[in-house]
Amino acid sequence: MSDPAVALNLTIATRESRLALWQAEHVRDLLQSQGHRVALLGMTTKGDQILDRALSKVGGKGLFVKELEVALEEGRADLAVHSLKDVPMELPEGFELACVMEREDPRDAWVSPHCAGLADLPPGAVVGTSSLRRVVLLRDMLQRLGRDDVRIEPLRGNLDTRLRKLDEGQYHAIVLAAAGLKRLGLAQRIRRVFEPSEMLPAAGQGALGIEVRAVRAEVRDALAPLAHRPTWWMVAAERAVSRAMGGSCSMPLAAFATWLGDPWADTPHLRLEAAWGDPEGRTPVVRVQADTPVASLAEADALGVRVAGLLRAGGAPGPDTGA
């Protein structure tokens, strides 16, 4: 194993949005505090360029990471920092998730200049979101309020672009990840947060994942002090649900894990909730949960597979039935 005390010269590949740069700079500062010398390589990905179509129609969230992986493969960068919910469930051969950092707020945020919540929307209001998961969960809440008049419309672009579209009046409200708003000092834009019991978060939401080439043991060692075991095991369980379901951003799937008691105990107890909704709204949302003692990444993964089975038993389609 490489000596983690050895100072390295490292380059971080990152998207150039303000949020992505904040995330990369955060990792840079932590690595520099460990004695490493760190530079950033800013890049524009296809996911940033294609803004007129839903991600589910043009290749999924993997569009946000492919160019960064190419930079790693070509040796122009040593690591890539991602919002974990944007990272495909299966990484290309030769790449690995070397570090998962402590999670920020995983919840979804309601952002609106005039409406305190769904019930306050005016007749015919428009709510914006880029996520199929949010679409099905919002639609479920609206139906329970008897608000079939509210339209849910696509919303693409980086965080600043989405807020600008809201401020220009294109939407009455938008739903964003609370973590991104808080990281950029925009928590004051949050009108309210959705508790997981209302809107279950996406797998990995609020967590940062760092990707490296599998052969770069010295980089993996340098990242070890940044890793947060309780978060890593939580998101491993969540991502295992999506992987077992054949999930991508074309599947309206939520998965969210919480610790029951002390996550640093010898055998901590993990609860995993998941939800799936029909994009066309033809069937009710399927919601399931399970909990078990977890003492390794493999056991967290097994919990995710088990919960995926519960979803399929409840009527959600699996990878062989189409999503």
Image: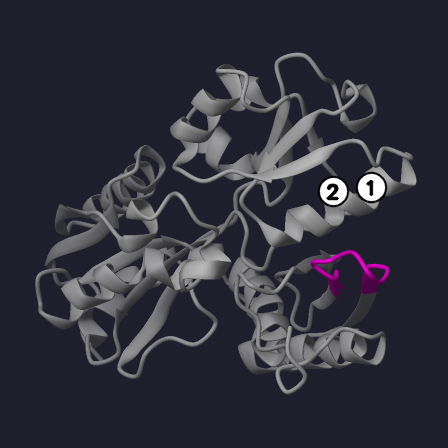
Q: Which mark is residue 322?
A: none
Query: What kind of residue is marked 1?
Result: Met
State whether residue 135 is above or below residue 61.
above
Residue 266 x/y as whole percent: 65, 71
Residue 250 x/y as whole percent: 56, 63
Which is nearer the eye, 210 or 161? 161
Which is nearer the eye, 219 or 115? 115
Q: Is residue 19 magenta?
A: no
Instruction: Specify start and end residues of the magenta stretch as a single range.
Output: 272-287
Whether residue 139 sits left or right of residue 81 in the image: it is right
Q: Quadrant of residue 241?
A: bottom right
Helix or strand or loop: what does disc 2 sit on?
helix
Q: Which mark is residue 138?
A: 2
Other residues around mark 2 within 10 Å, as few (<14) / some (14–19) / many (≥20): some
Residue 314 x/y as whole percent: 85, 74
* Residue 304 in sight from this viewpoint: yes
The residue pinned by badge 1 equals 141
Q: Badges 1 and 2: C-beta atoms under 8 Å apart?
A: yes
Q: Residue at x 66, y 75 (%)?
A: 304
Task: Kindly give the residue lying farthest to the top in the view shown.
Answer: 114
Query: What kind of residue is marked 2?
Result: Leu
